[in-house]
Amino acid sequence: MLQVKRQLKIKEFLVEKGFASVEELSDYFAVSEMTIRRDLDELDKQGFIQRVHGGAMLNDPAFFEMSVSAKSTQFTNEKEQIGKAAADFVKDGSTILIDAGTTTLEIVKNLKQKRISLITNGLNIALELTPCPQIELFLVGGMLLKNVQHTVGPQTIAFLEDFHADIAFIGVEGVHPTTGISVPDILDASVKRTMMSIAKKSIVVADFSKIGRNTKAKINPISSVDLIITNSKADKEIIRELKELTEVMIID
């Protein structure tokens, strides 16, 4: 297969999957890993992808948000580790805010035995906790973004403003020392900002691929975050800068 055609196929692969490892692409195209690395370097120069540890991810999330199904296949082990660590901060009797997302979904999987009140704008979060009778569950209404399965808009914000919470768990697409935490959608950013404003403590959960990134819609500066939980693969220099602004927990 010609290089140009293979790179086109790699683009199509990443549009569908969101992320691919060098090994996975090497097997798929039956070429060496060195060849795939050269292809990825070229696509990185074009601005189509972002190189991450062991592979590459679609660069477009800075401008639009991938579907839940696409996100659910990315960095699953890292998200599970973050979810377990984040759940340890939740105590029985507390009121928790959790926004929609695949990393925040891993948190609620570890909360099913807790006696808590939980408020969410995520359909995936609500469905996961529906079988748990001891959890008081509030699903926030508003305009449903079907691709990402969560609600946004003025009705969502008005509903949230009637609550006070102990902790807000916020999933993001970008964590940057200078530009703060961000997501691709401005309506989603407004909802997350509101969640943070009504919680005593805000915890950002972000796998290593989000660290150092800056997406379109700013939520808040890093100084407004009480804790960031991420993985040890995150850029060490960025982590050092983040630690000057807030607390950071690194999961091995």
Image: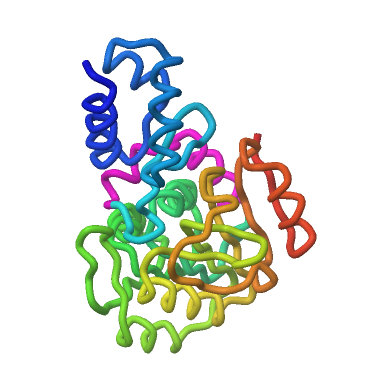
Residue 207: x and y, percent?
53, 45
Q: Is residue 83 visible?
A: no
In which quadrant will I find the N terminus?
top left
Q: Residue at x 23, y 67 (%)?
A: 145
Q: Is residue 121 above or below residue 159?
A: above
Q: Residue at x 22, y 36 (%)?
A: 12
| Along the viewing direction, whichever of 93 and 238 lies nearer the viewer | 238
**Magenta-drawn segment:** 67-88
Indicate left or right for 63 with 85 as reference.
left
Q: Is residue 77 magenta?
A: yes
Q: Is residue 85 above or below residue 186?
A: above
Residue 13: x and y, percent?
25, 33
- Count of numbered circles on the image: 0
In which quadrant will I find the C terminus?
top right
Q: Is residue 67 above or below residue 35?
A: below
Q: Residue at x 73, y 46 (%)?
A: 237
